[in-house]
């Protein structure tokens, strides 16, 4: 029998209400022992009950207690939630009383972990619980809800079902070769099915880029030589003094990060100033170095000083940016211009003093990432690295099976790859799992979830 766990599920601090959640076989009994009101062991499931928490004859708080009996609860165990007056002292006191009366403090994410271990949700859905909480904008919220409600899982299960069918058909053929009326899983037929599955997987992998961007935001690197106005642009975007703006070259030391919500998408600005700390990126350019630093960015904004001519280094950089999503911001349009906008591809002219050109810059970002088209998307994407790496492995297994077929390897050998693909799907859904990996995954959750 699992022990009974408890945790404060609301943020710690002063608020109208805080909630302590208790889960496990003894949750109703333990809360009942400190509760004055109806006998909680006799009330119906899924009821809210008014009363008081009493301890050592002292009335600790006036509360509402939700009693939810298994199995239809978040953890699939008996769950009790105590709604008490928000406030640090009262909440901590009630938690302490529970701990003194047989509950154990829950680890971060332990409620969700129990929901997973008790089979109420699969691993993809469990991860989505964390994502729903972490969602910073509308699109991330939609994406995580589609994962939480099982839309992504059912897509993955469909692939698993197809692999299973394929596998069993092949096995029937192997086991009963004498039955001629059994569907003959000829190599070409197996190959055709495998190719269809591969197409679906490739689409999932391709679309996971959208998923990643929706859930983590678009990483934007603002680059350019010193003093062109990178920090000023960042500040103008964020509308606050985030980066230190100075006209002494190379004095902005930290990588300054700021976030902006653009039509439900998070823009993560990474000022490359910190990169200058080691060696000046554009001075040293050899172009490679700065390109390396921006490799991980989803979008690069190259800032040019519009009041001075484009340098040789900047031209090189512009050439090298060709294969990357980028925008060139010709800054300092308030000064006399030394750059013709036609000299740069994908350029926006503006300045950070008034400021001007920012709306056009945002419009370009929207176009590059099809942000305006987001509403039409179905938000059923893989969005985390664990899921993506497993889907990639499934694809590799399928590809290996296809190669086997093409080289007329017997189907009973090919079936080994198909089985491996299915095993990787099981890992993805958490139907088989590694204990340590699961612990690591739930450790990242907040307390009380
Ligand atoms: P960084 O080194 O590229 O981050 O450049 P900063 O943002 O620190 O700006 C360098 C200098 O250029 C500062 O003195 C800014 O006030 C100035 N500056 C930035 N943007 C503009 C602009 O649009 N017009 C003018 N006239 N000066 C600017």
Image (tube, rainbow, N blue to C red):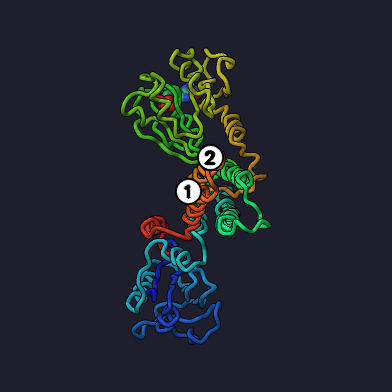
- The image shows residue 428 at horizontal and vertical percentages of 49, 54
The C terminus: image quadrant: bottom left
Q: Identify which residue is drawn at 42% across, 61% down.
A: 109
Whether residue 146 is visible to the viewer of this picture, yes or no, is no
Number of dots carrying numbers: 2
Residue 54 placed where, x, y %? 39, 82
* Image position, residue 162 (x, y; %): 60, 54
Q: Residue at x 52, y 58 (%)?
A: 125
Disc assigned to residue 106? none
Q: What residue lies at 45% left-to-right and 39% top-to-bottom?
A: 258
Please tell me whether mark 2 sits on a helix, a strand or a loop.
helix
Q: Which residue is mark 2?
A: 403
In-front residue for pair 192/281? 192
State how far apart marks 1 and 2 are (Cα): 20 Å
Binning the other alpha carbons within 10 Å of mark 2 as few (below 14), some (14 to 19) or many (20 upward) gives some
Q: Secondary structure at mark 1?
A: helix
From where the camera sits, is residue 236 visible? Answer: yes
Residue 8 coordinates in the image, percent (x, y): 41, 67
Quadrant where the image shows the N terminus: bottom left
- Sequence-wise, the earlier of marks 1 and 2 is 1
Q: Nearer the viewer, residue 332 or 110?
A: 110
Task: Please name which of the two marks, 1 or 2, marks the residue nearer to the observer.
Answer: 2
Residue named by callout 1: 390
Out of 282 and 422, give the one closest to the viewer.
422
Find residue 448 and report its image quarter. bottom left
């Amino acid at each position: 029998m699992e022990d009974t766990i408890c945790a404060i599920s609301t943020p710690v601090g002063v608020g109208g209400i805080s909630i302590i959640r208790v889960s496990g076989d003894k949750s109703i009994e333990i809360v009942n022992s400190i509760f004055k009101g109806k006998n909680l062991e006799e009330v119906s499931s899924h009821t809210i009950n008014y009363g008081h928490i009493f301890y050592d004859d002292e009335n600790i708080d006036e509360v509402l207690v939700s009693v939810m009996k298994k199995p239809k609860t978040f953890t699939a165990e008996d769950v009790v939630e105590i709604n008490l007056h928000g406030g640090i002292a009262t909440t901590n006191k009630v938690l302490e009383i529970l701990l003194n009366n047989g509950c154990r403090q829950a680890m971060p994410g332990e409620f969700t972990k129990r929901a997973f271990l008790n089979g109420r949700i699969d691993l993809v859905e469990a991860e989505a619980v964390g994502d729903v909480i972490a969602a910073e904008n509308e699109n991330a919220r939609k994406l995580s809800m589609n994962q939480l409600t099982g839309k992504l899982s059912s897509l993955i299960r469909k692939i698993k079902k197809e692999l299973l069918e394929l596998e069993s058909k092949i096995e029937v053929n192997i086991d009963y070769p004498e039955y001629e009326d059994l569907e003959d899983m000829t190599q070409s037929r197996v190959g055709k099915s495998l190719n269809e599955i591969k197409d679906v997987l490739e689409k999932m992998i391709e679309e996971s880029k959208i998923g990643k961007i929706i859930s983590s935001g678009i990483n934007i690197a603002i680059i350019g030589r010193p003093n062109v106005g990178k920090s000023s642009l960042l500040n103008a975007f964020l509308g606050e003094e985030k980066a230190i703006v100075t006209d002494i070259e190379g004095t902005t030391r930290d990588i300054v990060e700021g976030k902006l919500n653009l039509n439900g998408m998070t823009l993560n600005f990474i000022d490359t100033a910190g990169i200058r700390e080691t060696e000046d990126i554009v001075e040293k350019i050899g172009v490679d170095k700065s390109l390396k630093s921006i490799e991980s960015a989803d979008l690069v904004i190259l800032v040019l000083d519009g009041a001075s001519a484009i340098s040789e280094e900047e031209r090189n950089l512009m050439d090298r940016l060709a294969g990357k999503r980028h925008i060139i911001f010709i800054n300092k349009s308030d000064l006399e211009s030394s750059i013709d906008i036609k000299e740069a591809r994908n350029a926006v002219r503006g300045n950070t003093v008034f400021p001007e050109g920012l709306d056009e810059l945002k419009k370009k970002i929207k176009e590059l990432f099809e942000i305006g088209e987001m509403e039409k998307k179905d938000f059923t994407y893989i969005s985390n690295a664990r899921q993506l790496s497993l889907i990639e492995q499934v694809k590799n297994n399928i590809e290996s099976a296809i190669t086997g077929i093409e080289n007329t390897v017997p189907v009973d050998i090919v079936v080994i790859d198909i089985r491996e693909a299915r095993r990787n799907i099981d890992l993805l859904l958490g139907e088989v799992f590694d204990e340590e990996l699961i612990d690591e995954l739930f450790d990242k959750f907040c307390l009380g979830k």
